[in-house]
Amino acid sequence: MDEPDFWEVERGFWLEGAPRFRAWMAKNCVMVFPPPVGIMTRDAILDAVDHMPRWDDVTLSATTLSRVAADAVVLAYHAEGTRTGQAPYRVTCTSTYHRGPDGWRLIQHQHTLA
């Protein structure tokens, strides 16, 4: 089973729409965002992505990839997302990917305001 370019997958979550999320998110994925959003699970995540514009661009910096097991990878990074007419969105993020029977899937993602 080939390993994806996790950084390209991650950028796609920022820049692409719901099809990216459906393709890469595990059924039991959990995401945590700053207030007022908070904790979200798969159905709420997909609903939000369907109704929210994606970012025009994102810059990922201070990128760290940690192989915590043969079937698990954790990404940590700073992100700056931009949309026309809005202030930049600056956060520190983590994402955890797990390789299961269906291949690599995102199981966790979290934003902390920078």
Image (cartoon, grey):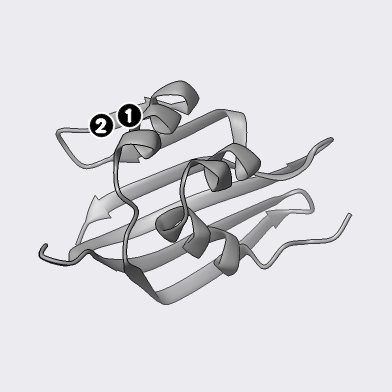
Horizontal side, residue 90 vs residue 70: left or right: left
Name the residue at the top extreme.
Answer: 43
Horizontal side, residue 82 vs residue 28: left or right: left
What is the x, y in percent for residue 110? 38, 46
Residue at image point 15% right, 33% down? 36
Which quadrant of the view contains residue 47? top left
Q: Which mark is residue 99?
A: none
What is the x, y in percent for residue 74? 57, 55
Tell me the amino acid under the disc marked 2: Gly
Name the residue at the right extreme.
Answer: 1
User: How many C-alpha atoms fall within 10 Å of the one at disc 1: few (<14), some, or many (≥20)?
Assistant: some
What is the x, y in percent for residue 7? 56, 68
Residue at image point 49% right, 41% down? 18
Quadrant of the drawing holding the C terminus: bottom left
Residue at image point 46% right, 48% down? 17
Tell me the amino acid under the disc marked 1: Ile
* Residue ID for mark 1: 39
Measured along the vertical axis of the image, is residue 42 above or below residue 114? Answer: above
User: How many C-alpha atoms fall within 10 Å of the one at disc 2: few (<14), some, or many (≥20)?
Assistant: few
Q: Secondary structure at mark 1?
A: strand
What is the x, y in percent for residue 69? 73, 52
Horizontal side, residue 39 vs residue 77: left or right: left
Which quadrant of the view contains residue 26? top right
Q: Secondary structure at mark 2?
A: strand
Residue at image point 18% right, 67% down? 84
Quadrant of the drawing holding the N terminus: bottom right
| Along the viewing direction, whichever of 54 and 30 lies nearer the viewer | 54
Q: Are marks 1 and 2 in contact (CB under 8 Å)?
A: yes
Measured along the vertical axis of the image, is residue 69 above or below residue 3? Answer: above
* Residue ID for mark 2: 38
Q: Marks 1 and 2, how far apart in space?
A: 4 Å
| Along the viewing direction, whichever of 52 and 43 lies nearer the viewer | 52
